[in-house]
Image (cartoon, helix red, strand yellow):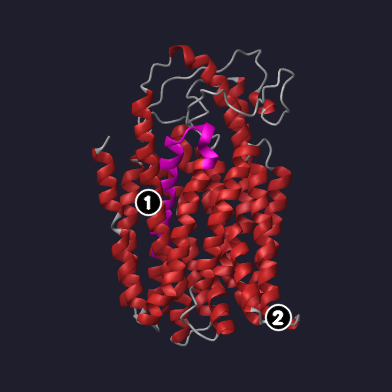
C-alpha cells in the first residue's frame, strides 16, 4: 500500500499537463509578493473592515484555485498545504474505511437474525444509506459555512454514535432502536464519500482526479481489514455479553471516533476555506480582463453536474443492491461469516485500491470515457454474479471485484466532472446535494435488493443491476452532443 501511495502523492504535484479533460484554463496571476499569504488568511477572523477573508468576492466564479504558473512563494505554500491535507485525509480515511466496512459485512445478517426473515435483510443497507442522504446535506452545509474540517469531523462523530446505538439495540434485542441506529450510522458513509472532495479543493485542475483517488485509495486499508475482523470482533463481543453479529460495530464505532479526532485536530489549513481565499484574490486580479460568456458557461456547468450526478447515482444503485445481498446469498448456500467477509473485503479493495490508476486515466483520457468503462464493467459484474454457482467463493469474489472496480470508475470520473464544473462559491453545497442523490440511490438499491431476491432470486437481481448500469452510455452521448 505504501508503494502505491508514495509515488502517487509525488506525481500529484509534478509539472501539470496542458491536456486538461475540459480544455486548458486561461492563465492566472498571483497577488504581488507583498500580499499576505491566503493560507494564513484562510483561518483568520474577519478583518477590521468587516470582510470575511474565508469567503470569495461576490462575483467570484472559478473552479480552480491553483494556477499553472511558475513557482512563487504562494504556489509553494499551496503545494505544501495540499500535501499536508492529503496526509491527514489519508489517515482519517484508513480509520473510517474500517467503520464503513464493518456494517456492510454483518448488517444484513444482524437484521435477518433479529427480524427472523430474509425478506428484510436489505433493510440495514437501505437505512444507513438513507441516513447518509440526510448526513450528506448536513455535512455539505456545515462545510459550506465553516469549512471541511468541522463538517467532516461532525459526520464521523455522528457515525460513531450510530455504531453505539446498533450495539445497544442488539443487546436489548430491540428492532426499532436498531433501525434508528442504522439510520444514524449512515452519517459515517456520507462523510467517507465527502472526504474525497476535500482532497480536490486545492489541487491543480489537471490533477484533481488523482487527488480524489489518493483519498479514495486510503480507504482500502481499513476497508479490507474491517470485514476480515468480523469474526474476531464477534468473538470479543461474545466475551463481553454482546451478540456475535454486533461485534463489528464495536470496531466501526471506534474507527469513526478516531477519524473524527484526527480531522478535528490536524486538518489545517482548511482546504475549502483556503481555496476560496485564493480564488477571491485571483478573481480580483483577473476581473478586468475576463470576457468569457457567462450564459454558455452556466449551461455547460448544468450539463456537467447532471452527467456527473447520474454516473455516480447509477453506479451506487447497482453496487449497493448486489453487494448487500451477496453475503445473504452466500449464507443461504452454507458459507459462514469468514467466507462472506473475505468476498466483501475483496469487493471493498476493488472499490478503492485501483483509485490511483483510475485517477490517472481520468486526467489523461477525460471523465466521460472512464464513466463509459464503468457501465461496461458493472454489466460484466452483474452477468458473472448471476451465473456463478452459489458454492463458488472464487467466482463470487471475482464478480464482487468487478462490481467494486466499476463503482470506482464511476465515482472518480463523476467526482471529477462535478468538481470541474462547479464554482468554489457554491461547491460544498452542490457536492452535498449530489451526494444526497447518491445516498438515495444507495438506499433504493439496499431496500429493493432484499425484496427482489425474496420474490425472484439473487441472479435476477445481479443481472438486472448490470443491465441498468448501461444507462450511463446514452447519458454520456447526450451530454456530449449538447456541448
Q: Nearer the viewer, residue 474 or 329?
A: 474
Location of residue 244 with respect to 385 vertically, above or below = below
Residue 350 lies in quadrant: bottom left
Q: Kindly tell me whether residue 460 is visible in this rendering.
A: yes
Coordinates of residue 416 in the picture (x, y in percent)? 43, 42
The residue tagged with tag 2: helix, strand or loop? helix
Residue 317 lies in quadrant: bottom left
Q: Is residue 394 left or right of residue 47?
A: left
Picture disc at residue 172:
2
Coordinates of residue 479 in the picture (x, y in percent)? 29, 42
Q: Nearer the viewer, residue 257 or 351?
A: 257
Q: In this view, does 379 lie to the left or right of 231?
A: left
Q: Kindly tell me whether residue 345 is visible in this rendering.
A: no
Question: Of the residues tagged 1 and 2, which is closer to the observer?
Answer: 2
Alpha carbon distance from label 1 to label 2 = 41 Å
Coordinates of residue 160 in the picture (x, y in percent)? 68, 61
Q: Name the residue under label 1.
A: 311
Let me know if residue 423 is in the magenta part. Answer: yes
Disc 2 packing (10 Å; few <14; some 14–19; many ≥20)? few
**Prevalent SS, magenta region:** helix
Coordinates of residue 229 in the picture (x, y in percent)? 62, 72
Q: Which of 44 and 382 is in front in this view?
A: 44
Q: Which residue is drawn at 47% across and 88% down?
A: 334
Location of residue 350 with respect to 117 vertically, above or below = above
The residue tagged with tag 1: helix, strand or loop? helix
Q: Give the range drawn in magenta.
A: 403-429
Q: The N terminus lies in which quarter of the figure?
A: bottom right
Amino acid at each position: 500500500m505504501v508503494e502505491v501511495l508514495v509515488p502517487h502523492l509525488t506525481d500529484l504535484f509534478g509539472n501539470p499537463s496542458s491536456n486538461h479533460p475540459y480544455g486548458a484554463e486561461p492563465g492566472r496571476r498571483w497577488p504581488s509578493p507583498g500580499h499576505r499569504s491566503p493560507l494564513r488568511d484562510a483561518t483568520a477572523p474577519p478583518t477590521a473592515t468587516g470582510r470575511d477573508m474565508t469567503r470569495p468576492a461576490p462575483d467570484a466564479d472559478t473552479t480552480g484555485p491553483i494556477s499553472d504558473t511558475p513557482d512563487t512563494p504562494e504556489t509553494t505554500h499551496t503545494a505544501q498545504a495540499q500535501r499536508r491535507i492529503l496526509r491527514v485525509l489519508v489517515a482519517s480515511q484508513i480509520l473510517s474505511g474500517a467503520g464503513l466496512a464493518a456494517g456492510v459485512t454483518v448488517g444484513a445478517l444482524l437484521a435477518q437474525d433479529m427480524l427472523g426473515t430474509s425478506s428484510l435483510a436489505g433493510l440495514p443497507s437501505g437505512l444507513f444509506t438513507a441516513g447518509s442522504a440526510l448526513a450528506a446535506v448536513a455535512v455539505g452545509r456545515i462545510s459550506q459555512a465553516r469549512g471541511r474540517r468541522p463538517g467532516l469531523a461532525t459526520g464521523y462523530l455522528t457515525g460513531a454514535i450510530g455504531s453505539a446505538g446498533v450495539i445497544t439495540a442488539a443487546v436489548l434485542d430491540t428492532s426499532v432502536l436498531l433501525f434508528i441506529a442504522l439510520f444514524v450510522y449512515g452519517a459515517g458513509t456520507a462523510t467517507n464519500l465527502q472526504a474525497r472532495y476535500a482532497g480536490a479543493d486545492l489541487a491543480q485542475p489537471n490533477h484533481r482526479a488523482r487527488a480524489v483517488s489518493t483519498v479514495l485509495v486510503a480507504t482500502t486499508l481499513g476497508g479490507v481489514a474491517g470485514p476480515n475482523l468480523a469474526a474476531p470482533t464477534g468473538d470479543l463481543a461474545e466475551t463481553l455479553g454482546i451478540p456475535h453479529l454486533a461485534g463489528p460495530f464495536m470496531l466501526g464505532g471506534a474507527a469513526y471516533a478516531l477519524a473524527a479526532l484526527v480531522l478535528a485536530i490536524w486538518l489545517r489549513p482548511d482546504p475549502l476555506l483556503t481555496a476560496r481565499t485564493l480564488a477571491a484574490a485571483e478573481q480580483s486580479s483577473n476581473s478586468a480582463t475576463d470576457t468569457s460568456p457567462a450564459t454558455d458557461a452556466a449551461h455547460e456547468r448544468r450539463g456537467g453536474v447532471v452527467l456527473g450526478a447520474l454516473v455516480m447515482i447509477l453506479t451506487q444503485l447497482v453496487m449497493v443492491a448486489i453487494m448487500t445481498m451477496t453475503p445473504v446469498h452466500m449464507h443461504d448456500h452454507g458459507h459462514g461469516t469468514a467466507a462472506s467477509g473475505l468476498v466483501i473485503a475483496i469487493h471493498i479493495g476493488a472499490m478503492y485500491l485501483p483509485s490511483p490508476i483510475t485517477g490517472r486515466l481520468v486526467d489523461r483520457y477525460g471523465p466521460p470515457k472512464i464513466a463509459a468503462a464503468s457501465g461496461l464493467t458493472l454489466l460484466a459484474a452483474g452477468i458473472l454474479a448471476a451465473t456463478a454457482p452459489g458454492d463458488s467463493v472464487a467466482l463470487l469474489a471475482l464478480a464482487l471485484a468487478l462490481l467494486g472496480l466499476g463503482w470506482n470508475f464511476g465515482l472518480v470520473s463523476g467526482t471529477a466532472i462535478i468538481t470541474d464544473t462547479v464554482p468554489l462559491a457554491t461547491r460544498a453545497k452542490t457536492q452535498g446535494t449530489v451526494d444526497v442523490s447518491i445516498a438515495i440511490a444507495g438506499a433504493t438499491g439496499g431496500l429493493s435488493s432484499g425484496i427482489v431476491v425474496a420474490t425472484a432470486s439473487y441472479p435476477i437481481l445481479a443481472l438486472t443491476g448490470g443491465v441498468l448500469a448501461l444507462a450511463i452510455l446514452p447519458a454520456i452521448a447526450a451530454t456530449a452532443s449538447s456541448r
